[in-house]
Amino acid sequence: MGTVRLATAADFESLCAIDHAAFGDHAYDRFALRQFLALFPRSVFLAESDQGEPLGMAIGGHVASGEPGWVLSVAVVPSARGQGLGRELADRLTRRLAELGARKVRLTVEESNRAGRALYASLGYREVGRDDAYFGRGHARFLMEWTAVSGD
């Protein structure tokens, strides 16, 4: 499967390529990805094949100890899906946000994304809310939350 490591500014183009391959028209714009790298350098992960091909990424944000962390994106290119990489990235990011002081980690997921909701639930996230117009009318999202336990 390759390696998962913290991304650096040198990985910017790879992150953009992964995001576009995974989300198409719904990908973040380049400005947002550049800002995530600058703001959250300790919680942006890149997954690469053994040959250095970009396969996936996970981006999270955490501002202050005691405040919740946020999973901003977990993305895997279509050719690398179904191999556990999304799970590894989501788990690695959740643990990193906890290491940075987040006792809770939150994310939103599309109502129609049953696979994503199941993945996050299997990692200990639970649904704690729903916003019927998160991205505007007709774009419902579930809010999910992971809570650290002693020893995490």
Image: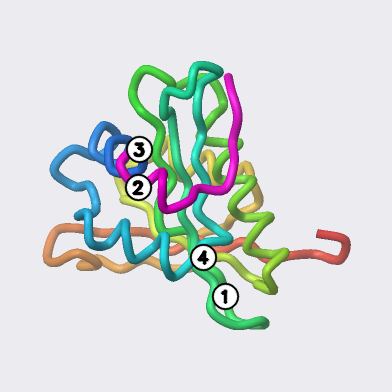
Lower position in the chain sequence, tag 4 or tag 1: 1
Q: Is there CB contact under 8 Å for labels 4 and 1?
A: yes
Q: Earlier in the sequence, mark 4 or mark 2?
A: 2
Mark sitting on residue 68: 1
Q: Secondary structure at mark 4?
A: strand
Identify the mark at residue 14; answer none if there is no mark: 3
Quadrant of the rendering where the C terminus is positioned: bottom right
Tell me which label, 4 or 3, sits earlier in the chain.
3
The amino acid beneath tag 4 is Arg
Nearer to us: label 2 or label 1:
2
Q: Are marks 2 and 3 in contact (CB under 8 Å)?
A: yes
Comes first in the chain, label 1 or label 3: 3
Q: Is residue 66 left or right of residue 75?
A: right
Magenta span? 1-13
Residue at point 27% right, 62% down?
32
Comparing 136 with 66, the one in front is: 66
Give the label, 4 or 3, closer to the camera. Answer: 3
CA–CA distance in space, label 1 to label 3:
28 Å
**Rendered location of residue 118, percent (x, y):** 51, 40
* Kind of residue sitting beneath label 2: Phe
Tell me the number on the disc at residue 12: 2
